[in-house]
Image (spheres, helix red, strand yellow):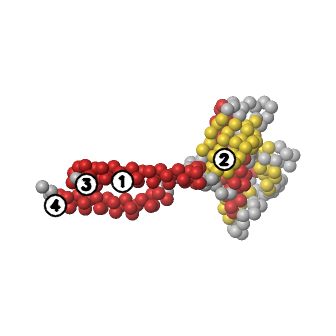
Amino acid sequence: MVNWRNAGALFLTIFIILFFAVATGTKIAKHTTLGLDLRGGFEILYEISPLSEKQQVTKRTLSDAAKALNNRVNALGIAEPDIQVEGENRIRVRLAGVTDQKKARDVIGKPANLTFRDSKGNIVMNGNDLAEKGANGVFDQMQLPIIVLHFKDPKKFANVTKKYVGQRIAIFLDEKPLTAPTIRDIIVDGKAQIDGQDSIEETKELAAILNAGALPVKMKEVFSTSVGAKLGQEALQNGVEAGIIGTIIVLLFMIVYYRMPGVIACITL
């Protein structure tokens, strides 16, 4: 004989569980990270070569380059990039959900070797002297975008500014001069700034590249392609439909064969 009180408690419990599942399911689904096949995007294959004749491309070099690329991709805000080393001198980068491919290429492929040079072109400091996350894109007092740099060793930077007081120190990104400020006073707090950027977005992008570090190799793009999400979405939809149909068949079999125990088992399932 069916105990309707216990059955009612079971149905109430199931109803509460289903209510919370429906209420929270949509939110959880929206925050689920989808891959390249479900979101679309693009992939790039890079060929790696050494920066100089003295350097060799080794497994360690490729691994360091892949880590630097991962840092740069994270600076773009792309979740879970797929970066793989292939063969002896290639790295494949797959980015899901990327719409601005040009921006992604610019950020990923820039060498970003930051140097500080005196009037004779001698390098007095470089990007390795920056503190961790030491570049920040902000607005100055005139509401103009600038990059504020923080150095690991303020004393070293103070000695450089002391030596070159009254002279210009040029700041280069690779071989492109960014700015050449005049050192008016000794800077003891280990801070400098780069101005001349067109927008705060460009400033923050450059700061992110500097924080990610210079690439230890040269990269040449040998292949790229856009990846559509249609096939992945169709496969996902077909899988969901197959799962629903299979579940219904199992539930019907349980109810027809086992009657009331089957109904309870189906509800529990």
Which circle's residue, 2 or 1, is located before the other in the chain? 2
The quarter in which the N terminus is drawn is bottom left
**Disc ID at residue 79:** none
Which circle's residue, 1 or 4, is located before the other in the chain? 4
Residue position marked by numbered label 1 in the rendering: 248
Residue position marked by numbered label 3 in the rendering: 263
- Residue pushed farthest bottom? 142
Residue position marked by numbered label 2 in the rendering: 43
Which circle's residue, 3 or 2, is located before the other in the chain? 2
Query: Which of the two discs, 1 and 4, sits closer to the camera?
Result: 1
How dense is the environment of label 1, judged by Cα within 10 Å: few (below 14), some, or many (20 and up)?
Answer: few
Query: Which of the two discs, 3 and 4, sits closer to the camera?
Result: 3
Q: Residue at x 25, y 60 (%)?
A: 11
**Percent coordinates x, y for residue 23 in the rendering:** 39, 63
* Gap between marks 2 and 4 measured at Cα: 59 Å
Q: Nearer the viewer, residue 160 or 32?
A: 32
Query: Which of the two discs, 2 and 4, sits closer to the camera?
Result: 4
Q: Is residue 179 left or right of residue 58?
A: right
* Gap between marks 1 and 3 measured at Cα: 13 Å
Q: Nearer the viewer, residue 193 or 15?
A: 15
Residue position marked by numbered label 4 in the rendering: 5
Which circle's residue, 3 or 4, is located before the other in the chain? 4
**Percent coordinates x, y for residue 260 in the rendering:** 21, 54
Please state which amino acid type lies under the numbered disc 3.
Answer: Val
- Residue pushed farthest left? 1
